[in-house]
Image (cartoon, rainbow, N blue to C red):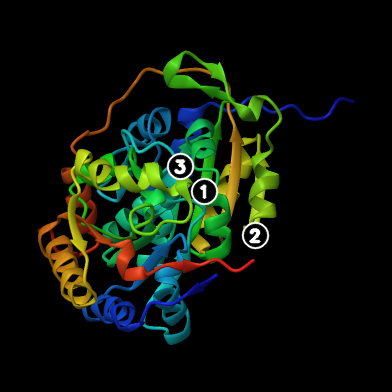
Amino acid sequence: MSDTAPEQWKDAIYEALKDAKVRLVAYVPDAGHARVIERIHAEGDMKGVVLTTEEEGVAFCCGAWLGGERAVLLMQSSGVGNCVNMLSLVENCRFPLVALVTMRGEWAEFNQWQEPMGRATQGALELMGVKVMRAERPEDVGPMAAAGLESAFRSDQAVAVLLAQRLIGRKEWVK
Amino acid sequence: MTAPHHQPLERRAVVKRLVASRRDLLVVAGLGSAAYDLFAAGDHPANFYLWGAMGGAAMIGLGLALAQPRRPVLVITGDGEQLMGFGSFATIGAQRPPNFSLAVIDNERYGETGMQRSHTALGTDLVAVAKACGFASAQEIKAEVELDAFAAHALRMTGPGFALIKVTPQNPPRVLPPRDGVHLKNRFRQVLGLDVN
C-alpha cells in the first residue's frame, strides 16, 4: 500500500497549525495525516500525542485549552463515531475544537467496511454541534484549516475540516 | 498478634485529605461521586468538575498537564469513570508527564446507577495496568497515612503517579458543584491568568 497523492496540501496543514500557534497535536494515525505527523515529531514546533481512541483526543484538546494551550485533533472519518458523547464536553463548556478528518468510504474506496461511518461522518459531527467544512481541492486545504483554527481559537467554535478522500488518492493495495 | 488493622477509608474524607495542602494544584474531577467529593472538600476556581464526558477526566488532565508543565495536576475520579477511559493509561504512559497524578477512588461499584459491581470488583487490577503502561509510580492505598504521601508526591511532580484508593461502597449525601461548564472553564482559566472569550 502506498500513498500516491502530492504532498503540498499536507504541508499546508502543517504550516497552518504552526502559524496558528498550535502546540499540541493529538492523533490516531491515518495515511492521509502521515506526513503531518512525521513533521510534528521531526521538527519540534509542536508536540505529537498518539491516542488509543479518538474520544481521548477531544478530552485532551479541552484540557489543553483549560491550561492555555492550543491543541488540535487529527483522525480519519471512522474515528468521528468514537467521539460522539465526548463532544458534549465541547458544547457544554464552549471549548474550541479543531478536528482535521481524512475521509474514507467516499471515493474509490477499496474497503466497504469504511462506507457506513464515512457516510455518517458529517451528519454525526453536525448532530453534536460541530461546524463542518469540507476541502475537495488541494488548494482549499491550507486556507480552510487556517479559517477553522481562527474561528475555534478566536471565537470558541467547534470545527471539523473534512479532507475529501479524493484529495488523498487511491490506496494502492499490494499483495 | 494480629496485623494492625486500619479503618476502611471513606471517600469524602479521602478526597478532602488529598487536596488539604493543595497549594498550586490543578484538579479535575470525574463525573458523579468524585465531583461531589471534591466540591464537598471546598470549592476552588482551580477545580474542574465534570458532569458528563464519562471516560474523559484523565485525558482532560493530560492536556492540562502538558499545557501547564510547571503546575501539578491531579485527576480524581471513580473506578467506573476511569474504566471507560481505559486507553488513557496507555496514552498518559506514552507521554510520562511528571506533573500528572491520577487518583481513582475505588468503591468497586457504579455508585450513580444503583451500586452495580464494576470490573475492579471482578478482577481488574488498575495498579498493574498503570505500571504496565509506564506510570512512574502506582500503588494501592488502604490507609489514611498513605494518602498524605501520595498527595505530597503529586505536588513534587515526579510522576506520572497513580493511586487506587480503596473506599467503602457508600453514597454520602450529594453536594452538587456548579453545572455551568462555561463558568467552570472561565474561572479556571482566569485563575491561571488566561483570557476568557
The residue closer to the viewer here, B92 or A11, is A11
Callout 3 and callout 1 share a chain:
yes
Label 3 belongs to which residue?
Answer: B76
Where A172 sits versus B89, above or below? below
- In front of the other: label 3 or label 2? 2
Q: What's under tag 2, amino acid-wise?
A: Gly
Query: Residue drawn 39% across and 46% down?
Result: A115
Query: Residue drawn 30% across and 47% down?
Result: A121
* Numbered label attached to residue B134: 2
The percent position of residue B83, horizontal first and vertical second, equals 54, 37
Label 1 belongs to which residue?
Answer: B102
Where A140 sits versus A92, above or below? below
Where A77 sits versus A8, above or below? above
Quadrant housing residue B140: top right
Q: Where is the N terminus of chain B found, in terms of image quarters?
A: top right
Q: Chain of mark 2?
A: B
Q: What's under tag 1, amino acid-wise?
A: Leu
Visible residue check, residue B158: no
Instruction: Work out whether mark 2 precedes mark 1 in sequence or the reverse, and give the earlier one.
Output: 1
Q: Secondary structure at mark 3?
A: strand
Instruction: Work out whether mark 3 precedes mark 2 in sequence or the reverse, and give the earlier one.
Output: 3
The percent position of residue B179, horizontal first and vertical second, equals 22, 33
Residue extending farthest top: B114
Q: Secondary structure at mark 1?
A: strand
Q: CA distance from mark 3 to mark 1?
A: 6 Å
Q: Secondary structure at mark 2?
A: loop
- In front of the other: label 2 or label 1? 2
Crowd tier of the residue under label 3, counting other residues whose Cα lies within 10 Å: few below 14, some 14–19, many 20 or above: many
Q: What's under tag 3, amino acid-wise?
A: Ile
Crowd tier of the residue under label 2, counting other residues whose Cα lies within 10 Å: few below 14, some 14–19, many 20 or above: some
